[in-house]
Structures are given as structure tokens and as C-alpha cells.
Image (cartoon, helix red, strand yellow):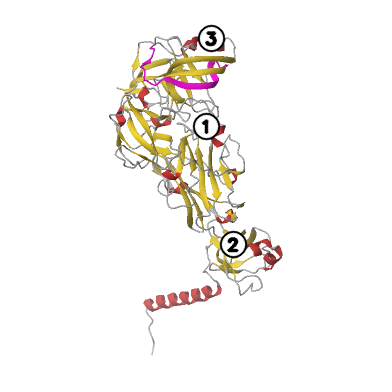
Amino acid sequence: MKKIFSSNWLVCAAAAACMFLLLIISGCVNTADSGADAEITGFVFSVKENQDYLSQDIAGSVDTGSRLITVKLPASVYADTTVRAALRASIAYGTGTVYAGAASNPDYSVSPVALPVTTQSGNSATYLVKIERQYDTASQGSLLFTEYYSGLAYAFKGTNNQYVEITNMSAAPVELGGCELNRHCWQNGIRYPAQDQSVQLSGTLASGESLVIYSARTTFSFSGKCLSDAYLNSVVSFSGEDGLTLTSGGIVLDALGPGDGIGTGWNWGAAKRMQRKNSVTAYSGWKESEWITSLAANTASDASNAGFRTPALSASAKEITYFAFENLDDVVYGTIDTADKTVTVNVKEQYGTVLEPTVSTNGSDIRLADMSRIISGKTSIDFSSAAESNPLKLYVYDNNGTPCIYGVIFNVIKETVYTRTNYDFDGGIQSVLEAIKNGDTSFNTDVTGILTCKNVYGYKTAQACFFLQDKNAGLYFYISDTADTPLPVNAIAGNKVTAHVTAGQIYYAMPEVTKISAAEVTDSSVHDIYYETDRYSEEACTGRIYEYAGTIEKGMDSYAVGTFSETEGLYFHADFDFQEKLAKGTYGRFYGPVLYSYSQYRMEITDENQIKSD
């Protein structure tokens, strides 16, 4: 009988045959690692493989991204290169990955050790095994932060002079290799966890010994044990808002800054020298009252005790050492007179009179007249009646319970007023200016003028330059950040300031004072600032205040320079914080002193009061 085969059956048969052929082929090739990376997934020095040397398994930390394996060995094993050379590792590989090294047993007496691996499909990689010493965890209370310093902070860049001091409070030496210094980053009130830093310390601190870790840019000299942060990933680069913690084995040994070292969105740590009171011997949470804070002068004397424990204070000490309103857009620092027992603060009208002062004492605590304790930076106080004739009383207690009364004089400062009425005094500025133009470089004379602009960025090492002006002329003070006598930090625009000039020069056609031996606010009242309106792009205009009324032609570039009018040669140099207010097309009135720089006449703008948008 004849059998008839349908075409459908033939198609099915052909498909089955192809499937069978594919199965045979697939059986001959391992496709599990096709395209997969060669990788190591685990690394252990086990007791089973190393029973003569180890008492417990030691697992390495494998980072497949960087292909780095970190293994921490006990101190005795780490120090014995013969033992390390004899160690055998148990290694776990990814699917299809095999070891491709020439030596079957790598020599771990050196570090790092290369472990080449490959897959059957030809993908290859090299892992590095980094051998480190295992340190004991430092015990709670063994180490404390005992000093913190962050010099004057300016608008463009942070300060150069910064350091932190760590002291061994225990009776035995402490190995720092088991400790980490951690910086928790903030900038302009915003937390940036991705920028946090954690660096492992090294070395040993004897009982009672201190270590100063300082910024590589610091100009101070230190006694005792010290270390540049050039070896620690520049961790000492404080924004003034950052917090610090000291940890060991996941345990927080100490914290520096609000939020138990996490930091906060205001300048709690800017322009400060902070010394831990000698009576504090253990960490129990961040307490500002444990520290004696003073305003940083940015002079070498500020670091005189760095590297040594803060001396014990007299039981009768009861001075206010620091007073400021830190949680304002512009930090306001008080002027403390320890002889008259007064604190004078000048606060802009816009901030009101109910504020939370940050205040520090070398005594035990500070109280109001009703005996309520002031918590630094948190207690709200109404200063509306704190005039010179009726200061607000603060009771500062020593450790014996005896009070000392300070009076706070609270001056409300109205918005800066610019006027066409000139000053009525000759402060000697013209004579110094002419002498500089005539080539004189050495001086020994006082000049007095109205402070018309401060915190002018002259260079990366001169970020607090300023201008003074009397009825005859204006003068630019190019003062290094490391100068022994900077402008007093509490000086504000409109104050009358006297400076003792000792050096000056002509720098690319710009006359400037380069050194002063003294500077003080001789009249703390705020004077209206005299301005001129003529075209200011000529030599005779430098150092003087001018007004530009019109539209901004070009906004700020990457050097913070903008253009009022290119055809008229009118430019400005400003704080980056004012970039939006000084954008292209903005119309308004702008006031500032003129400085000649890079062949341009530039108006310097460092305060928002210099910008009057219409």
C-alpha cells in the first residue's frame, strides 16, 4: 500500500533535525561565560589552609568595580614576611572564571599582589590584593578632639589656616591606624553626603600626647606632633558648616559640630579658634559649652597652644570669649571689651532684634537677668532695648558660682545709604596716595577713612582687601590673609577706620597699601557713603566710590568679572553669590570703589547693599 507524506510533516521533520543538530553543537561548547567578565567574588585566608599561622579565618574585602581586594592581617602575621609568603588563599571565582597566573601560590609578603583571571571565552582581568595591618579598635574615651581652628572665611575661597587637634586621653598608647577622621560636608546650607571624606589615620599617640592635623595650605608653624593633610586626601578643608567625627571600628569616639558631628547649614565653625576645656575627659554628645571659642585673628599667635592640651583654667575665670549671630545671611560678630565688660554688636535692620546668639565663656555658664541659662545658638533673646544707655545684662558664672555682669549694646544698622555729600574730614589718604605714586614704598603713618568696601578678592592669598576714603581721595589696601594685622572682622561699611600704613607700591598702574601694623574702628557709627558719578575708567578714579546707573551688558564670567558697558570701558568684579542680581540685562544703580586690574577699570561689589535694582 502506498503511503502519502504531507508537506507539513516534512517541515516538522526538518525542524526536528535542526533542533537535534543544535543540541549536539551546544553540547560541545560551554556558553555560560559568553560575554561575562572575568571576576573574583571571594577571598579568604582560612584556618584550614593556614593552620600553622592563623587562629581564625580572615576574609578580604572584594571590590569588583575597582578590582581591589583588601585584606587586614593581625599585627604579628603582617610583620612576618616569611609567614605572609607561606599563606594560602581560598579564592571564589565568577561563573566561567579561572586563575591565569604563572605561580600557583602567589607570594603575599609583598603588597599589592596581582591575581590575573580569565574566562573560557577570552575575557581577562587583573585583581590586586592589598595587604594591610589589622589594628585594634580604640576604646571609647581614649581619643578626643581638643582644638579646632578655621581662620577668617572670605567670599571667594575658604581660609588657608585650618587645623584640628586630637589628644590621647587614656593612660596607655593608642594606635591611630584603627581610627578614621571623617568630614561631613555642607556648602551654602545644603548637605552633600557624596562629598563626605573618611581617612584612616596612622602612627601612635602616647598617653596625654596630641596630634595636630593641618591643611597643607596653612601658613602657621606648630610645636609637638603634627601632620599635613596632604597625606590625608586634603581632609582639613572646612567650609565652616562641615562637621567632624572620629571613629574606630564603627564606634564614634568624638564629634565636633552640631548634629553630633554631622554639621549644619550655617557657619557654626567659620572664623573660629575652639579649645576643649581641660575638665572635659570623655565624649557624651556634641556640647558647645565644652569649648572655649574665640574669634580667629588669623595670626601665628592663634596656634600658640596647638599640639598641647588646653591648660586648666582658673576656677574664677568668667569672661565672654566669643559673641556672634551665626545663623544670619551675614554673620555678625560682637566686639568684646573685657575691661569694660561690654559686647557691642551692629546688626542690619532687616534681621530684627529677636535673635539667637552664639556665645562662649571660659567660665561655667551664662544666664539672663531672670537666671535662665543661655544655650549657645538656640536661646532667643529680645535685644530691642539693649542700647548703650541700657545694655542687656548677661551674668557670666565662674566655677565657684560667682557671677560677672556683661552688658550687650545692640545697634540697629539701617541699609547702607549712598550720598552725593562728601565727607568733612581729611584723614591723610591723599598724601599717602601721592607718595606711592611718586615711588615711595616704606611708610610709618596713620590714615583715617570711611570703610567703603571690605572682603575684596585681590588674589587667592589676599581675599580680605578693603578700601578707605576721606574727603580728598580713596585708597586700596591689598592685605595678605596671613598679615599680622588684618582689618577687624567686626568692621562694617560706613565705619570710620584708622590704619597704620607701613608699606605700599604701584602694581600695574594701581596704587595700593600692602602692609599695615595696626587697624581699628575709631567710629562704629555707620556713615553715609559718598559717591561720584563721572565716568570712572581713568587713573584718577581708582580707590574712589562711583555709581553706575544703567543696564548690565554682560553677566559675570568664570573669573567673576562682568561688563556694564564695553564701549565705555566700564566693568565690575563681584562675589559669585550675586550672579543672578548682576545678570545680563539687569537695570539698576550700582555702587562701589574702582580698582584697576588686568587693564580694566572695575567696580568692586562684595555686598548686596551695593546693588540697587530698579
Magenta span includes 213 = no
Question: Within 10 angstroms of label 1, few (less than 14), some, or many (20 or more) residues?
Answer: many
Viewer-nearest of discs 1 and 2: 1
Q: Which mark is residue 61?
A: none
Q: Which mark is residue 71?
A: 2
- Distance of mark 1 from mark 3, alpha carbons? 31 Å
Location of residue 70 in the rendering, given as x and y in whole percent from the top left corner:
58, 60
- Residue name at image x 56 percent, y 46 percent: 233
Disc 1, SS: loop
Disc 2, SS: strand
562 left or right of 586 in image: right
Q: Which residue is mark 3?
A: 434
Q: Nearer the viewer, residue 22 or 261?
A: 261
Location of residue 153 in the rendering, given as x and y in whole percent from the top left corner:
47, 33
User: Could you tell me the amino acid type at mark 3?
Assistant: Glu
Which picture quadrant has residue 115?
bottom right
User: Could you tell me the amino acid type at mark 1?
Assistant: Asn
- Distance of mark 1 from mark 2, alpha carbons? 43 Å
Q: Which mark is residue 298?
A: 1
Q: Which numbered disc flags the more N-terminal residue, 1 or 3? A: 1
450 left or right of 141 in image: left
Q: Nearer the viewer, residue 14 or 249?
A: 249
Q: Nearer the viewer, residue 139 or 494?
A: 139
- Give the magenta range: 504-533
- Residue name at image x 38 percent, y 14 percent: 531
Magenta span includes 510 = yes
